[in-house]
Amino acid sequence: MKSSFRLFKIAGIGIGIPYSWLLIFPFFTYTLAQLYFPSVFPGWSIATYWIAGAISALAIFVSVLLHELAHSLVARANGIPVHSITLFILGGVSNLEEEPQKPWSEFAMAIVGPVTSLVLGFILWGIGRGLGVSSTSNAALAVIYYLGVINIYLGIFNLLPGFPLDGGRVLRSIIWGSTGNLIRATNIAGFVGQLFGWVLIGIGVYFVVIGNIFNGLWFAFIGWFLMSAADASRKDVRLKERLSGVKVRQLMNMNVPTIAPETSVQDMVAGIFRRQQDRAVPVCQGGQLAGIATITDVKKVPQEKWAATPVGEIMTRGNLYTVSPDDNLQMAMELIAKHDINQVLIKDGGKCAGLLTRADIIRYIQMSQELGISNRAGDSKGK
């Protein structure tokens, strides 16, 4: 969560919010305190409006947290590790370490979020209605009723069958289960998501034309977000399909230099980093992979000590992320993205076989797009 900061953990799952939330929260508080509550519940004091607005904004945050926790806990029950949850004011993202491998798993994960929001919403709405909420109600009852309505809206909106909303994932899981084709299911669900996005943009334009600019801009923004996210999801699944059909050996450089642990940092910098402009090098001993040394490792050592410091003292030994020549590029890309690293080591039966970088994969993708290659890279063995 680089663009966010962590607040706490629940059930071992890190909960974080983006830095932009610090600006969005005051905006929502202002909107509720100066626009919504005064128009629906007149007669409160100014302080009461602001307190109700702030509490409601925080409570929306908690509601979204419960929605995302439901997703995450069901994911873990299906054997999918969940690293963290990033919360926005009206939505969130459960950061899964892998995608569901079965249609039923995705269906269960997707449906539980909206169901949680709807159950919570109807409980709060029922309490508000049961206690007789009206324009003269006190702030506490008004906030409860408002949160009930917001959670019902949140649940219904997420059930829209537009990918990547929860309803879109439900739709994808059903098509996936019926056809056995995840790519086709994603394309259909993504198309429906884009269609809903255009519809929402159209509604937003209509509201702006009739003078309801605030609601119009919100509808247009949500529609644009949904349309963009659906398009990105379709492109992502096509990219995964392309990478899964290419072996690591088709991109790996067979002539990647390696060094021994006893090599000095000075020699490594002069012979590899400066001469060949590489940023990392496999460290091997007796042909066996021992670790990896990077420019980041070198920066930890004062320059005057480079000549006397062996690479074995600064290299990374544990948590080595490796692939074999027969693994597909999708696996390599997932390792790089998951662990936020720039390269993976290639190991063939325990022996040093090379290095595959993020840049290598990006260059392959760009070249494939320019040449119109849709799936495999052919029989090429080099980069």
Image (cartoon, rainbow, N blue to C red):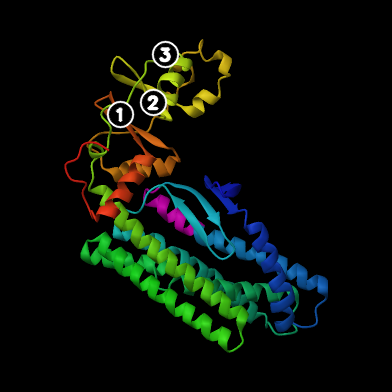
Q: Residue at x 31, y 60 (%)?
A: 104
Q: Nearer the viewer, residue 356 or 112?
A: 356
Residue at position x 53%, y 77% in the image: 219
Residue 207, image x, y percentages? 56, 85
Residue occupied by mark 1: 354
Q: Earlier in the sequence, mark 3 or mark 2?
A: 3
Q: Earlier in the sequence, mark 1 or mark 3?
A: 3
* Furthest residue toward left: 379
Q: Quadrant of residue 346?
A: top left
Residue found at the very far top of the displayed protein: 308
367 magenta-colored: no
Amino acid on which the number 1 mark rests in the picture: Gly
| Distance (Cα) linking label 3 and label 2 | 12 Å
- In the rendered image, residue 4, in percent from the top left (x then y), is placed at 58, 50
| In the depicted structure, whether residue 163 falls above or below residue 100 | below
Magenta segment's dominant SS is helix
Q: Nearer the viewer, residue 145 or 272?
A: 272
Between 375 and 267, which is closer to the camera in this rendering? 267
Cα–Cα span, label 1 and label 3 = 18 Å
Q: Identify the element where label 2 is drawn.
A: strand
Write down the residue under mark 2.
Answer: 281
Secondary structure under badge 1? strand
Q: Which residue is mark 3?
A: 263
Residue 118 at what x, y percent from top left?
Answer: 50, 71
Q: Position of residue 149 (x, y in %)?
A: 58, 76
Viewer can see residue 58: no
Q: In the image, is residue 77 part of the stretch drawn in magenta?
A: yes
* Three-letter amino acid code at the position of disc 3: Thr
Q: Is residue 345 above or below residue 43?
A: above
Region rendered in magenta: 69-80
